[in-house]
Structure formats: structure tokens, C-alpha cells
Amino acid sequence: MRMIKISKDIKETEARPRTRIKSVLEAFENIVELAKDSNLDDKFFDNASAYIRYASRKLALSPMQTVLLALFVDRSEDNRILISEIASYAGCRTTKILRLSSEIDVLENKHYLRASRSRDRLSYRVPRAVLNALKENRSYVYTTEPVSDLQSFFDRFNDLMGEMNNNETTYEALLQQTGEYFSEIKDSYFARTLKKLVLDDEDRLLFIYMAHLFVENNDDRIGFGDLDNLYDDNKIPGWCKNELRGHTSELFDSNLIENVNEEGMARSDCFKLTEYAKSDVLSELKINIKAKSRESLIKFDSFPEKKLIYNPSEKSQITELASILSADRFCEIQSRLRNAGMRTGFCSLFYGSPGTGKTETVYQIARATGRDILRVDVDKIKSCWVGESEQNMKKLFDRYRNICKDSALAPILLFNEADAILGVRMEGATRAVDKMENSIQNIILQEMESLEGIMIATTNLTGNLDKAFERRFLYKVQFSRPTVEARSQIWQAMLPSLTENDAKALASQFDLSGGEIENITRKYTVNAILSGQDGIDLQSIIEICRNERISDSVKAKIGFRI
């Protein structure tokens, strides 16, 4: 056999005068030089025997493996070394090098070489770590640190994805290796949580890959193009794409991923980790979820200071509530409620006609108490996907709880214009949309029971408030349309150059809300700027009032403050 003859030739040369060789790289240099156009025949092995013997002993490789490695190292600047290039240099047919594939496989298994197996061709590269070892005149021993925690797990997975991107491993190998790493952290919270969800191996790998994209790149917009990289030939399988597009993947049911929401619409081709996955499943990574969660907060100092004018009954209630929500007093009240075995959360309802200052009052309370606002747009919570609206609502309260844990002052959870979720629940609902509405309301009612922060809902409802909500709102403040006296003060606050008599006249003649008066003064100011007019033109203001005025009716009150 060829190998026996090579060994015999090397043994026979041992009696010859020894060539003093100082390093493996020196031996490789001579091997490569002698191999050129040699056809790797017996004469080549005879001439290069001393160099082959030195390097093969040093690296614990066979003579042929040593020769092949020397030829690959000589081309190590190229990350796509082809078999045909090795054959061309050695002056032999490509098939001859292909017959030595088992020897090359040994080099790959020992990590002296890394192979890239794309659809087009097979190529190799020499890892930098191998070159460093050879420079130090030592054999390369591939070692890995043990996967001891979730961070090292994702570090190792990142390495695997590097190999996957270079076509140096396959999907099946990635699946197997990830499973082995996963078993090494079986006692971690991450592994135990995923095990409870009973995901199959492929779904688990898909989630790990999505989590990898989030951990490494803070990627909250994962498209099918990104997912292609996980699979062989950079192409996501049809079954996987269909499950994701059709919202039937177990990852949705397990609340691990969700669709990216743009302008109130769920993108069926874009995905991201849920807040639950980020803050709970990946909690061992100690990612700065606090910063990510707080991105949606409106800072209290972003609200310009405004002087709001209330009717007497509203003013006393707002003043009292603002006082309670001040930092020192709120902590004291919560502590006493907790000691008394009572709920510590403060849920308040601001209701009344449009333009009466409900939302602006929340902003001014936030400004006065130094509390940021997490504003909820109900339309963005709702989704066309079955069950996702309910999940979105749960995730909202989960996010609010996480923010409260990481905040010195609990922010205000503001459900603005919450008419759609505070109405009377449908009895015996049969339509899917009615069932969804009821489910969302039940979730909110449950969350209000356990809330430890501050929730304020604003609504224009006047008689359709569900009794279950009415019981759970500790403060219920009705914002009535302003009285004549209040309207007069609003007019003068908006237009300081308006005389007291003119302000009273406008207030008496037009039953407008504060929002409507603000709108009118803005229109008047714009017109005055365009016309270059100074001073007050009462008739012009009256004309704008007539165009603005919608209704003089007094709406029925709901609720009361307790």
C-alpha cells in the first residue's frame, strides 16, 4: 500500500545525514518547495522525508496529512482554497487529491482546516488559531471552554452561526451542536423555561437564533431574509415560513415571539421577541431591558407647563389626587395600605365631554409629580390575529411592572381615550370580535386588582361604563363643560389682552369647552399674524366661535369620586 511504502521510505532515510530543522514552518516551506510539480510521487517523499518526518512528529499527523497541511498553509491568505489549486501546484490531477479526501477530513476534524460546503463548490481555509500555533512551533489542539451559563451558551452559538454563515457547518450539525450546548446548561432558568414549553428541537433552535439576533444586534425587526441564514443554502424551509406567516408556530403560542407592529398593523413577514422573552426568559443575561422598556415612556419634563382652569368640584379633586401622587406622600400611603392588607395601586378615571382637559390634566399631574407616562394607544393593542390582542394587553402590563421595578418613581400608565375598552361587556358574546373585547376587558380588570403603580384612564363615555370598572377605579373625576365663570377665566388666560367684560361676554354667549376655546384662540392668532393686526377684534373672535361651536347640550354625568 502507498502509506506503507511512504513509511518505509521515511524509515530508510533515517540513516541518512539529518537536516537540522528549526521549526514546523521551516519544514513546511521546504515541503512546499519540493512539492511543486512533483505529482507527489515517491521521489518527492524521498527528497522531503526529513522535513515531513520532523513536522509529522511535531504535529502528530501522518506523513500525507503533513504534506497536505503544508500545501494548505502556503495558501492560508485565501479563505477559499480549492482542491484544484492544490492539485495544480503539485502538478497532478484533481482526482488524485480527491482520493486523499479521507486525509483532508482528518485535518478538518482536528480543526487544522475548516471546510465550506456551499451549493457551488467545496473550499477550505486555515483558521488563524492554527497559524498562531504553527508560528509558536507547536501542534494545534482545538479546545473549547465549557458552556457554564447562558452568556457562554450564546457566545458559543455566535461562533456556530459564524461557521454557518461561512458554510462550514450544516443545519443538522448546528441543530445537534446547539442541543449539546443546551444540555450543558439544563439547570439554567432559560433551559428550564424552554423545556416547560415543550418545543420541538427545530422550534427551539429557531427561537434561540432569534434571541441571538436580539442579544448580538438588538434586532427587533427580524425578517425572512434574516431567518434564511439559519438554514442550509441560506433558504428558510417552506413549512417554517408558512407557520410564521400563518401565525401557527408554537413560538407565538408560547409568547416568545410576536409580529412587528407598524401603524397599528401586524407585519406577517417581520418578527421580534416579546417583552416576556426579553425580560423573563433571557433574564439571566442581565440585558439592559430597563433601557429598552423605558424607550416608550414620555418624560415628565417634556410637557410644557400650562395653567388649567377647572370648575370648583373638579379643582378640589385634581388638587387632592396630585398631592397623593407626589413622591413622598404616595410611598407613605402605599405603605399604610399594604400594612392594612389593602390594594396599593391607584386607578383613576377621568371622564367627560371632549375638550374638557382630561388628558392635559394627566400631563400636568405627571409634570408636577415628576412621573413619566407610559401612554397606551388601544388601537395599537388590538390585532387582527386571534388571541394576539389579549397577549398584547398582558405584555403591556408586564412591561409596566418591569418599568416600575426599575424606577425610583412609578410612571403613570395612561389609557387615553379608553372608550373602546371601558364599555359594558357583551353577555353571551358569539362573534369573535365581541369575545376578544370581553377578554381584553377581563384582563384589564384582573390587572387592576394587582396593580401596584398608577393607572389613569380617560374617556368620553357618559353612561356606558361597565360596573366592574366603576368599582375598581378609586378616583372617578368628572370633567364637566366649564361654567360661565370658568370659561371667562379660560378666555383671558388664552388671550391676555382680552378685557374682562369681553371675556365674560364670550363666555356667556358660547358654551364652549376649554379645548374649543384654545382652538379658537389659535385660529384667531394665526389670522391676526397673517393680516398684521394688533389688538383685539371681538367680532372676528365671535365669527370664529360660531364656526367652531358644535353643541350646547349638557351631557349626563357618570360615576362619582370615593
Image (cartoon, rainbow, N blue to C red):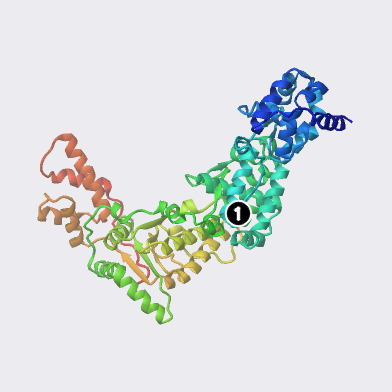
The residue labelled by disc 1 is 386
**Looking at the image, which residue is at 17% across and 39% down?**
528
Report crowding for label 1: few under 14, some 14 to 19, many 20 or more residues within 10 A (C-alpha).
few
- Of residue 9 and residue 98, the one placed in the foreground of this image is 9
Q: Is 467 situated left or right of 166 in this image?
A: left
| Residue 83 to residue 226: above or below | above
**Looking at the image, which residue is at 63% across and 37% down?**
137
Q: Quadrant of the C terminus?
A: bottom left
Q: Amino acid at mark 1?
A: Val
Image spot of residue 460 (x, y percent): 38, 59
SS class, disc 1: loop
**Looking at the image, which residue is at 35% across and 67% down?**
557
| Residue 114 to residue 432: above or below | above
Q: Is 3 situated left or right of 118 in this image?
A: right
Image spot of residue 276 (x, y percent): 54, 58
- Of residue 158 and residue 75, the one placed in the foreground of this image is 75
Is residue 553 something one can see in this rendering? no
Q: Is 288 situated left or right of 140 in this image?
A: left
